[in-house]
Amino acid sequence: MDFISSQESLSALEWALRAVVAFFFLLVIAKIMGQRSISQLRFLDFVIALLIGNIIAHPLSDEQLELKSSMITMTVIVLLYVTGVYLSLKWNGLRNIFDPQPIPLIENGQINFKNLNKARITVDILLSELRKEKTDDIQKVVLAFWEPGGTISIFLYPQYQPITPTDLTLAIKPFDFPRTIIKERKIVYDVLQHLGKDEKWILNKLKTTHNIHVKDVLLATIDSSENLKVFLYK
């Protein structure tokens, strides 16, 4: 394990071993930090990402720095991060530091210029975010918030909101999420088991409904009514 310690020089194999150890150690660190740090780059997450990236990078490029010391430092930082996240769930004061309240940028169809400066964004950025949400007119917006994760939440006046089946008093079909039953020529047996079917059943269904075999299928999904949608390689 000499490659983990400080060395005058490292062989190509030792450099490779450092990279492998660092890779799997980062996987463990990411698992401990949880999905929050991956899906949402909030204030605390951003600070931790900068620290971890900086700490692990140096021993992977400088043989005179110990990889072990960097791993110990990262472990302590991640423990502090997890503790901070846990405490922020308990104490509102700490939560407001780590996860600040959203900033209202538009209120009753008017831009709040003071809050634009507070959020440190320009009018161009605001308009860009509105376009991403398919909103073409600021005066249609009753409220728009700049969220801590760097996204914008938009609420339109009722008269500009999309029409839903409820508005038209239409019969609403229950939600039915299709399951992937074949992916890249391979049958997903867990889905077959959930449906109470076997391999012979899906092979026969492919043959009778589409006249194809599993090897021709890139993707196939099935809903609760056993309607099969197939996407072929060709």
Image (tube, rainbow, N blue to C red):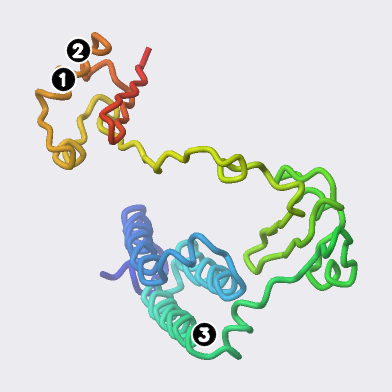
The residue positioned 17% from the left and 24% from the top of the image is 202
Tell me which amino acid carries mark 1: Leu
N-term-proximal mark, 3 vs 2? 3
Amino acid type at circle 2 is: Lys
Check disc 2: other Cα within 10 Å, few if <14, some if 14-19, many if 20+. Answer: few
Query: Which percent across, then down, holds residue 159?
Result: 76, 48
The Cα atoms of the two marked residues, 3 and 2, are separated by 57 Å
Residue for badge 3: 88
Residue at 71% over, 56% down: 154
Which label sits on residue 207? Answer: 2
Give the residue number, with chain letter if any, for mark 1.
203
Cβ–Cβ under 8 Å for marks 1 and 2:
yes
Q: Residue at x 14, y 40 (%)?
A: 193
Q: Residue 120, image x and y in percent?
A: 81, 67
Circle 3: residue type: Ser
- Check disc 3 and report its element: helix, strand or loop: helix
